[in-house]
Image (cartoon, grey):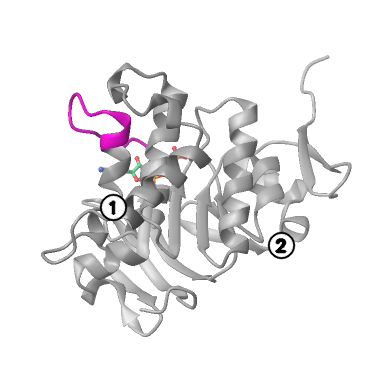
Amino acid sequence: MDKQVTQLLVQDLHAGHPGRPVLHGIDLAIEPGKVTAIVGPNGCGKSTLLRCMARLHRPQQGSIKLGAHDLWQMRQQQASRTLAMLPQSPQAPEGITVSGLVRFGRHPHQGLFRQWSREDELAVNAAMSSTDVSALAQRRLDQLSGGQRQRCWLAMTLAQETPILLLDEPTSMLDLGHQVDVLDRVRALANGGRSVVIVLHDLAAAARCADTLVAMRDGRIVAAGAPRDVVTPALVRQLYELDVDVLSAPGDGAPVVVPVRRFH
Ligand SMILES: Nc1ncnc2c1ncn2[C@@H]1O[C@H](COP(=O)(O)OP(=O)(O)OP(=O)(O)O)[C@@H](O)[C@H]1O
């Protein structure tokens, strides 16, 4: 599959859990070279949508296409060379070291006739360096802080070097400096031609890094477009039942949401 021109197209997607419908007809085009940020209240279906796009959750209706291919018809190895997902609460084998975890990201590139190579080593080192975990390489994952662990999982996802990245709240445990680093990295990956879908709760961060901001509520997309057009007090009220002012950030003019004080 062409690494640079893979569009991910979601059409009329319905998905859920037994007795609990979650997604009700999602249409979304994920374009190469763009960051798509998904926002919305807890439980609205953001992770379910990402999991469907990563082939971790089978939809009940609708289609997901990767270029001309149906995602669910693809061979597993081809899919994992194309899409990498960072889930919200990933699970690791007990006692694994950081470098052991990040090396897992190279599994889709291994095969009967393709053993560990210099290219794999370079990808692992680059992923660890860009997430600032190189100094932790020999530490056990289960002995790290929450934010350090989250950066290690991100390194594993980046080491996969896929044209499409699906990141579910990759900055939720990070300090401000590392949050900005990760979102800058996301921007750089998109500028280099990758497609990045990122779920974020921080609207200002989402607005700053995304080309397209997708707002979800109750399993439906209620708004999508350039962050400056989408982030309005009316939208924030619709999503979170919250009154806010929307200001322009000094510098790039990205929308910044400030809750209106309820008590004085
Ligand atoms: N394994 C499961 N079994 C049953 N219901 C589930 C399961 N996982 C999620 N749900 C339900 O599906 C709905 C959507 O969950 P999802 O995780 O997609 O929401 P989300 O928008 O990512 O939320 P958050 O912002 O809290 O991460 C929720 O009502 C949730 O309770």
CA distance separating discs 1 and 2: 34 Å
Q: Within 10 Å of the Cα at label 1, are there few (<14), some (14-19), or many (20+) other Cα atoms?
A: many
Q: Secondary structure under badge 2?
A: loop
The quadrant of the rendering that contains the N terminus is bottom left
Q: Residue at x 58, y 47 (%)?
A: 185
In the displayed structure, 138 sits above or below 78; it is: above
- The kind of secondary structure element at disc 1 is loop
Residue 219 in sight in this render: yes
Q: In this view, which residue lies farthest toward the right?
A: 250
Residue 165 at x, y percent in the picture: 44, 57
Location of residue 196 with respect to 113 vertically, above or below: above
Quarter of the picture containing the C terminus is top right
Along the horizontal axis of the image, is 50 left or right of 230? left
Left or right: residue 191 compared with residue 109: right
Looking at numbered disc 2 in the image, what kind of residue is underneath it?
Answer: Ala
Identify which residue is drawn at 30% across, 72% down. Answer: 71
Residue 108 position in % (x across, y down):
25, 59
Residue 174 colored magenta?
A: no
Q: Position of residue 5 (x, y in %)?
A: 49, 78
Q: Residue at x 41, y 81 (%)?
A: 67
Q: Residue furthest bottom?
A: 68
| Residue at x 59% of width, y 25% of height | 175
Q: State which region is magenta.
A: 87-100
